[in-house]
Amino acid sequence: MEFNLASGLEILERTPAVIRSMLSNLSPEWLDGTEGPDTWSPYVIVGHLIHGERTDWIPRARIILAQGEDRCFKPFDRFAQFRESEGKSLAQLLDEFATLRSENLAILDGWKLTEHELGLEGVHPEFGPVTMRQLLATWVAHDLGHIAQTARVMAKQYREAVGPWRAYLPVMDR
Amino acid sequence: MEFNLASGLEILERTPAVIRSMLSNLSPEWLDGTEGPDTWSPYVIVGHLIHGERTDWIPRARIILAQGEDRCFKPFDRFAQFRESEGKSLAQLLDEFATLRSENLAILDGWKLTEHELGLEGVHPEFGPVTMRQLLATWVAHDLGHIAQTARVMAKQYREAVGPWRAYLPVMDR
């Protein structure tokens, strides 16, 4: 499936509601469970999505769109949420994510990107040249990847509780 | 995390809304995409969840609860949805799933299962003896596994579109 703005937006617009329906009002044992040391809980994942809204997708798209002399993206901090979520409830994080996403999609919509602009390039600190189209497709896939991760982390909290059924639940060992 | 009814219900009650928020009004390219031959699309997954409501969880729990002479479960048909979803729109399937789930949770609630009853056993056609507690934990984990699968299948539709970012998106290769 090739990226196009309309179908990408179908996902980007709904992610805050999906995450909310998965997590709001869950008890801490679901929200704080992980897959083991140095892996993320659902609560941590929401903070990571927020940090992406602030520093990744739209800021990088601006760099591409500007086509200035330095088109190099700033490296993304994959651990910022451990600082930035501190002291915040999950409900606060869910609201913050929904607000930022909606502001960012308004900015994207305002640009009315053309096919030409979707082909413009920026420079990723590791990969080198990448297009606007690839950046926006990654925003979408990144949402879906973290939705999958959230459900998987939660499923694994019952890894022992399911007894022999574990053999039929590939999610437990992914 | 050990299974208990209250925290299991937190998940079972919300799954229809989660699936709806992920899929309702999506275009066919998202709903019908798969991970390759003989793998399931989001549309197929919803049909599979419906078949589970009809023939798996509550019918098996009834067998355990009855403690009759024959406590053997009927094997579950993992392909029934290809027949049973035929001609139905996704919107119909989402409604059907929500209705069946809510009916099934009303039945479960009516039983007011005791700790003793959660320890009662039935016989799985492959695994042998399994408890009510394991069956109900599996119902929960099965929901979460298919939510994870749904998001993963959708992410993979952009496997090529993300370009070099694929290296940072483990969901693409799970």
Image (cartoon, coloured by chain):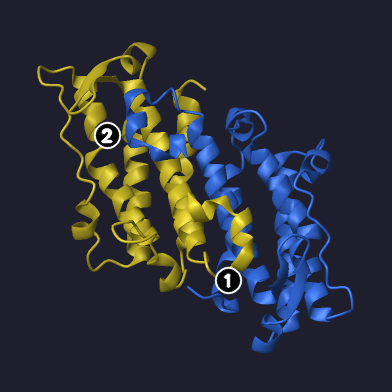
Chain colours: A blue, B yellow
Q: What residue type is labelled 1?
A: Gly
Q: Residue drawn 43% across and 42% down? A: B145
Residue B128 at x, y percent in the picture: 21, 21
Image-based side of B127 in relation to A17, left or right: left
**B173 w.r.t. A81: above or below:** below
Q: Which amino acid does label 2 sit on?
A: Ile
Image-based side of A21 in relation to A46, left or right: left
Residue B165 at x, y percent in the picture: 63, 61
Q: Residue drawn 34% across and 17% down? A: B118
Residue A139 at x, y percent in the picture: 65, 63
Q: Residue drawn 20% across and 52% down? A: B80
Image-based side of A93 in relation to A26, left or right: right
Observer able to see residue B109: no
Number of the front mark, 2 or 1 = 1
Observer able to see residue B157: yes
Q: What element carries label 1?
A: helix
Tell me the residue that label 1 is attached to. Answer: A8
| Residue lying farthest to the left in this orientation | B69
Tell me the residue that label 2 is attached to. Answer: B58
Residue B112 at x, y percent in the picture: 36, 22
The chain that hosts pointer 2 is: B
Q: What element carries label 2?
A: helix
**B93 w.r.t. A111: above or below:** above
Give the crowd class for mark 2: few <14, some 14-19, many >=20 residues within 10 Å: many
Residue nearer the viewer, A104 or A52 = A52
